[in-house]
Image (spheres, rainbow, N blue to C red):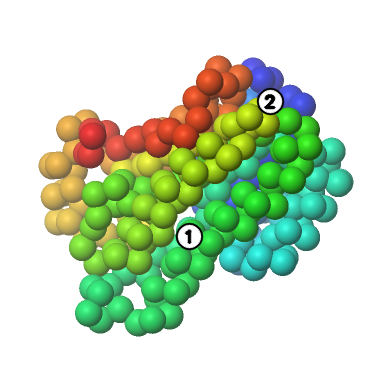
Amino acid sequence: MMEFKDRVALVTGASRGIGRAVAIELARRGAFVVVNYARNQSAAEGVLEEIRALGGRAYLCQFDVSDFSLVQEIIAKVEQDFGGLHILVNNAGITRDGLVMRMKEEDWDEVIRIDLKGVFNCTRAALKSMIKQRYGRIVNVTSVVGEMGNSGQANYSAAKAGIIGFTKAVAKEVGSRGITVNAVSPGFIETDMTYNLPKDLKDRYIEEIPLGRFGTPEDVAKVVAFLVSDDASYITGEIIRVNGGLYT
């Protein structure tokens, strides 16, 4: 399966969780994957090793998605070094949970800066190359909590809801240039973010999910792979839910 053989893909926050699964899935399908990470170099190197073990091609690239100037500089270099950028998956994100009445200003700012501004930074930089080549696939990772809200996650919910509006707006702006912009909205997925949830809370969430389980990062990665494929060339501005029926 080499459907992305001539494609260069950048996946942000690709050292773990959903980003890791997306990077591996795209590489497995033939893409050259730029694996972005912020701090966890050893985890990123593990992703690189796994991709190479599959016979795939990848390159590690450390940068903070919230640094506007740095992102513009690095993505321009990626385009120059690897002959363009065809696929962008905006996955990088953090949580700083807490009730609004107790939330620190820096916890609000940091989540908005990385989870929402980071999507703008990377998209703006990637569009230069995509518009020039009249081709591009952008997928933004939002969340079910951006659609339905979640107590203790006002900052995260706001950032993820912002991504939904951003996706729809940019899809309208660049559709005429052969670029599609979509989002996936995962529900509760088995990642580092959900691993430490108390068992009783996990059990309560699972009771609310019609399919009766948390999703896997691979469940999300396969949807992302579809959205960046030629099979999805007439889909743009959409938010695809991958939540086991939790929110419809």
Tell me if residue 108 comes above or below residue 172 in the rendering.
below
Residue at figure coordinates x 63%, y 29% from the top left: 176
In the rendered image, which quarter contains the C terminus? top left
91 left or right of 2 in image: left
58 left or right of 226 in image: right
Residue at figure coordinates x 49%, y 44% from the top left: 169
Residue at figure coordinates x 41%, y 59% from the top left: 159
At numbered mark 1, what does the secondary structure look like: helix, strand or loop? helix
Question: Disc 2 marks which amino acid?
Answer: Phe
Packing grade of label 2 (10 A; few <14, some 14-19, many >=20) is many
Question: Which label sits in the foreground, 1 or 2?
Answer: 1
Q: Quadrant of residue 82?
A: top right
Tell me if residue 209 comes above or below residue 90 in the rendering.
above
Name the residue that disc number 2 marks.
4
Sequence-wise, which precedes: disc 1 or disc 2? Answer: 2
Question: Disc 1 marks which amino acid?
Answer: Asp
Where residue 244 sits in the image (x, y, percent)?
27, 34
Q: Nearer the viewer, residue 202 or 3?
A: 3
Packing grade of label 1 (10 A; few <14, some 14-19, many >=20) is many
Whether residue 233 is visible to the viewer of this picture, yes or no, is: yes
Where residue 96 sits in the image (x, y, percent)?
37, 70
CA gap between label 1 and label 2 equals 27 Å
Q: Nearer the viewer, residue 75 or 39?
A: 75
Where residue 163 sits in the image (x, y, percent)?
45, 51
